[in-house]
Image: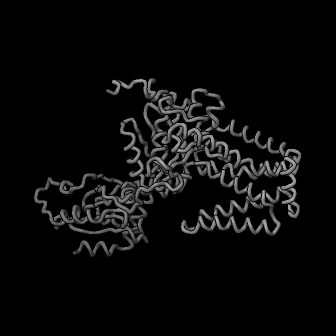
Amino acid sequence: MSFFRKLMKLSVNQRSSTVVNASADPNPHLVLLSSSLDANIAVLQSIYEDCSDVVIHPFLIGGKTNAVLVYIEGLSNLEIIDQHVLLPLMNENFEEDHIHFTEKLTVSQKLVVTTISELIAQISIGYPVILVDNESTGTALGLAKWDKRSIEEPAAESVIRGPREGFTETMTVNTSMLRRRLKSPQFKTKLIKIGRYTQTKVIIAYMEGLAEPGLIEEVTKRVSRIEIDGVLESGYIEELIEDNPLSPFPQLSTTERPDVAASSLLEGRVVILVEGSPFTLIAPTTLFALLQSPEDYYQRFIIGSAIRWLRYLFLGISLLAPSLYVAIVTFHQEMIPTHLLLTLAKSREEIPFPALVEALLMEVTFEALREAGVRLPKQVGAAVSIVGALVIGQAATAAGLVSAPMVMVVAITGIASFMIPHYSAGISFRLLRFPLMILAGMLGLLGIMMGIIVIYIHLCSLRSFGIPYLSPLAPMKGRDWKDVLLRVPWWMMDSRPSPVGKRNPYRQPPGQKPGTNRGNEDM
């Protein structure tokens, strides 16, 4: 029992001297483990001071050799540790000197640690470490286990037809879902750790032979040069590696769906997975990729193309409807039919505000209601948004603060903005709606045209990892139009998108049209 008493009564002087010696090194965590178990314990206790979840458990190997097991509660599998580590080591008699204790452990993953930094790294990821007296190395055991969320359907990317599973916050689960879809050794994953304190795992995934080597190198270089104290979500990475950080438009696509990530990999793109986040990043991306839904490719091509055109139409409505209403009512009344003009004039005769102020008031109120609905609990969020919009709209109309046509325009605009499948792209157009309304209130249709020209010039100059943001329309690539304006049938989609699929441009041989190779006719 002297060893246990010694462990619990390490003197303050011994701890202080150990820490001073370690601090003499430029990086104290790079010092080698000592052959003295007491010295190693002193270093650990000083590093993990006031860490109640770090356990340093002393025990005797074979009843005679002093050792400790170091782990963090909640990150290690205690059941396996008790049954397959502590029990056999404490009860086993090592009569043969040449047999090391690790040979008796029925654990498949065993790593040798030689420095304090390696020891801390293994403990931090949930690997318990065994330190033995008179040995200058430790043994880390692959027995990490922590609570994790089960695989569920992504709430923001739900589909009528398609897979129902989404990424989780656990990296191994996410990579396994991709590996299950891409059963090829050409599916490669590069691991990078970012964050001085979080040491967050970031995986750069790509298909060898499909992704351009220059793209892989550029993504790896941008991610590797990040120096930050912690990364808690993929949004950190997105802001630190995008081409134009001041643009309102996202230059990387995000998804929670493994099928979307796998399809992007098959097109030659690069996927970035971040530990602790279910949202993966896809690079590069284009504006038209952000306007596509995964269900476009699961429904028959006629339905997918019709829904895509409807989405483009309502994109224009969500961006321009309030601005056009303000411009026409304020400056261009001659464009309105007489009967409609009289109706509008009657509805606005008691409104104390100009059309611009009226539109801004309603749009800001609608955006506030939408954000409130998102932040509230799911059980009441939708109800509060709907009831709030109805009550406020009706009350504002009855009080004569806004006109009924303006309420209709704002409602249609709000519905149209929900048609954009990607939230990051949708919120960009929602923000641009406000400067366009101000231009419309000041200059009419001329102001709207000026605003559209500025937006178009910005989109033409925007790049995502060197790929034009408006590709394949600017620059024009006619071969890629079959997956932009329309969604052609799969038997016609024989080539990959040219900006990212140059290395292996064809995904299937020609002649896949149904009915061309039926074989034997029915008897």
Whether residue 218 is visible, yes or no, is yes
Residue at horizontal 53 percent and vertical 42 percent from the top: 296
Q: Is residue 184 left or right of residue 86?
A: right
Q: Position of residue 214 (x, y in %)?
A: 52, 32
Nearer to me, 307 or 119: 307
Residue at horizontal 52 percent and vertical 35 percent from the top: 215
Residue at horizontal 50 percent and vertical 50 percent from the top: 159
Quadrant of the rendering where the N terminus is positioned: bottom left
Quadrant of the rendering where the C terminus is positioned: top left
Residue at horizontal 40 percent and vertical 47 percent from the top: 177
From the viewer's perspective, is residue 387 above or below residue 360? below
* Quarter assignment of residue 11: bottom left
Q: Is residue 331 left or right of residue 154?
A: right
Q: Is residue 435 left or right of residue 39?
A: right
Q: Is residue 25 left or right of residue 76?
A: right
Q: Position of residue 30 (x, y in %)?
A: 41, 54
From the viewer's perspective, is residue 397 above or below residue 507? below
From the viewer's perspective, is residue 343 above or below residue 469? below
Q: Position of residue 397 (x, y in %)?
A: 78, 65
Nearer to me, 68 or 511: 511
